[in-house]
Image (tube, rainbow, N blue to C red):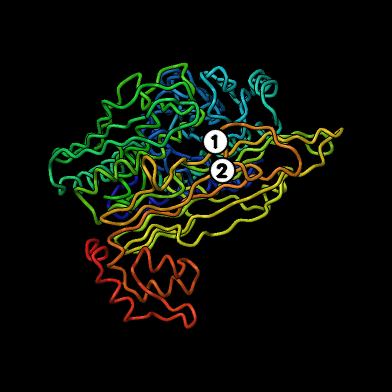
């Protein structure tokens, strides 16, 4: 007997699908070996119907996978169509052009069999710590320097492990026990997802399969987003930018973004953007599509759950051979150096259309990451990752929170976890006053982080390989952490080793006692700083977010440091100066 899909039942089943993928994500977190999954949450779990349409996407996830997982599933099914699959099969790849853009992301999918037939598919993508090759660097010139590439293969066939794949991973990676542990956790996640779907189908007597429910969910999501787009002013809006200089790239990188609002659809055209470069920052199309579509969903229709319908109204044009649609074998390890900026670039175009719906820039975009590799005293290799965020951008509604991840939606890894995983010790991790961009609503604060390499390696070989990747965005440089509608840019950038400034994104050999210090920018401000209530500025000073000097210089508010009160007369006089009046 088939379940009648009335409005109430559709909503119940829709929420149930989300609960299923979230349970799969929980299974992944609890069985994974590395902080990349357990703490950082750099993964995605998704569920598909028999046509390969994405129905649900885990809420604990890297949100940029929204536009990637549907293409990965379709690519899997082109290689292994349904008739070639058996119960117990699992398909694997990390090919950047087939999947999610760099080799350290492994995608594993599986058919879900129920009562002798395929009723859907499940897919789990995880960012792994290592896939061999050069150690975490933007300096790679092509994909062959970056590690092991796994073509689309069956990892399991009718429940039997293809041991050869595990053997290749073991032979090519620095910490194979952890890599394979996370791969097994992906299998767990897919099994949890399959089990949950089969229970739901039995409970609700979905004898006809998921297609009817899938069509309802996807069409409702699509129509919801299209209805929001249709209300936008029709027209063409541009935001062309020059990105901060990337180590190893001698020329400017330009991203040309033309946004066309036409009826109930939007086209984003990157024609004119820079070509591929000889550094590991090139983006495959899947990555560009995902991080370009994602901001429209955030700004226009954030409350509707993610599925294929959220992608259909958005068309992305990215010329082949450009940095936003690169060809094999270009290097892609650090592709987030470009892709994490797409939401901000799109918001820059949207500011002309919906200024009240877009955020100021985020001081943590692109993502800032630390990689560490060495050996413990007992000879075991370690490979650790840590991530620290800059300030969130201000918005029309509120100040930006401090050190919140955007657009990657990951978490800051606790310092204790990284210290336990590797031979390093944090010396400080502090918020930086005045780093948030001034505005009617202030940007969130950035932070300064410093750590020291510890001794204790085997046989006196205490050296540690370390790589720190930062955004490269300076307040007075190309593409700063910009504000919106008169808000000021966020402040803070720099990487020092033993008090000497160095470039980021390069793997270096460090010795015990070496200190690494870096600064992450605050978020951009929103609106004119002179529109900020002086009482709010005073609260910021009392709470240590803004200094007395910052209040005077950025907000033209004079505060008596002895009494922590506003000097109303001095403030009024200062705001009457030609400089202040010109800003008003």
Per the image, label 2 sits on a secondary structure element best described as strand
Residue bearing the label numbered 1 = 503
In the visual, does 461 lie left or right of 363? right
Q: Quadrant of the C terminus?
A: bottom left
Q: Nearer the viewer, residue 558 or 229?
A: 558
Task: Residue 365: name its quadrant.
Answer: top left
Task: Residue 2: name its quadrant.
Answer: top left
- Vertical position of residue 363 compared to residue 320: above or below: below
Residue at 62% in and 53% down: 414
Residue bearing the label numbered 2 = 495
Residue 563 x, y percent position in the rendering: 47, 83
Task: Give the CA distance from mark 1 to mark 2.
Answer: 7 Å
Asked whether disc 1 touches disc 2, contact meaning CB atoms under 8 Å apart, the reply is yes
In the visual, does 375 lie left or right of 478? right
Residue at 46% in and 40% down: 472
Q: Nearer the viewer, residue 165 or 288?
A: 288
């Amino acid at each position: 007997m088939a379940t009648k899909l009335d409005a109430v039942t559709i909503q119940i089943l829709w929420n149930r699908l989300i609960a299923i993928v979230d349970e799969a994500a929980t299974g992944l977190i609890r069985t994974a070996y590395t902080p990349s999954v357990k703490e950082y949450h750099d993964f995605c779990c998704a569920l598909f119907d028999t046509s390969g349409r994405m129905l649900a996407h885990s809420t604990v996830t890297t949100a940029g996978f929204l536009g990637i997982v549907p293409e990965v599933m379709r690519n899997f099914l082109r290689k292994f169509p349904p008739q070639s699959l058996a119960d117990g099969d699992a398909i694997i790849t990390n090919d950047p052009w087939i999947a999610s853009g760099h080799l350290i992301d492994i995608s594993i999918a599986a058919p879900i069999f129920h009562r002798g037939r395929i009723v859907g598919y499940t897919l789990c993508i995880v960012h792994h710590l290592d896939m061999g090759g050069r150690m975490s660097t933007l300096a790679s010139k092509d994909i062959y320097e970056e590690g092991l590439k796994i073509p689309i293969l069956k990892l399991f066939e009718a429940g039997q492990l293809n041991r050869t794949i595990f053997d290749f991973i073991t032979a090519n990676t620095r910490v194979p026990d952890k890599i394979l542990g996370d791969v097994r956790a992906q299998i767990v996640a897919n099994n949890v997802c399959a089990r949950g779907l089969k229970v739901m189908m039995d409970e609700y007597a979905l004898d006809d399969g998921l297609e009817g429910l899938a069509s309802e969910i996807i069409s409702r999501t699509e129509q919801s987003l299209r209805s929001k787009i249709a209300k936008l002013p029709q027209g063409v809006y541009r935001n062309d930018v020059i990105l901060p200089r990337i180590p190893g790239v001698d020329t400017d990188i330009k991203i040309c973004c033309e946004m066309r609002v036409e009826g109930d659809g939007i086209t984003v055209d990157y024609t004119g953007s820079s070509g591929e470069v000889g550094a590991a920052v090139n983006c495959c199309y899947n990555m560009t599509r995902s991080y370009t579509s994602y901001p429209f969903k955030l700004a226009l229709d954030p409350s509707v759950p993610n599925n294929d319908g959220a992608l259909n109204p958005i068309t992305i044009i990215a010329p082949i051979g450009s940095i936003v649609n690169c060809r094999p074998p270009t290097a892609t390890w650090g592709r987030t150096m470009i892709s994490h900026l797409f939401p901000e670039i799109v918001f820059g175009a949207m500011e002309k259309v919906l200024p009240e719906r877009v955020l100021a820039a985020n001081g943590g975009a692109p993502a800032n990451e630390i990689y560490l590799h060495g050996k413990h005293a007992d000879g075991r290799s370690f490979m650790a990752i840590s991530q620290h965020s800059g300030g969130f951008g201000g918005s029309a509604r509120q100040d930006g929170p401090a050190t919140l991840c955007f657009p990657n939606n990951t978490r800051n890894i606790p310092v204790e976890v990284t210290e336990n995983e590797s031979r390093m010790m944090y010396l400080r991790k502090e918020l930086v006053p005045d780093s948030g961009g001034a505005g009617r609503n202030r940007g969130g604060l950035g932070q300064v982080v410093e750590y020291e390499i510890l001794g204790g390696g085997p046989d006196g070989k205490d050296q540690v390989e370390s790589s720190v990747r930062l955004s490269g965005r300076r307040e007075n440089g190309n593409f700063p952490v910009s504000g919106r509608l008169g808000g000021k840019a966020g402040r803070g950038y720099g990487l020092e080793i033993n008090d000497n400034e160095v470039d980021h994104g390069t793997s270096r050999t460090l010795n015990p006692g070496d200190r690494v210090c870096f600064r992450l920018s605050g978020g951009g401000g929103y609106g004119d700083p002179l529109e900020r209530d002086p009482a709010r500025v005073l609260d910021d000073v009392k709470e240590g977010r803004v200094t007395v000097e910052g209040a005077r210089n950025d907000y033209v508010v004079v505060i008596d440091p002895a009494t922590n009160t506003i000097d109303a007369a001095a403030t009024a006089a200062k705001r009457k100066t030609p400089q202040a009046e010109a800003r008003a």
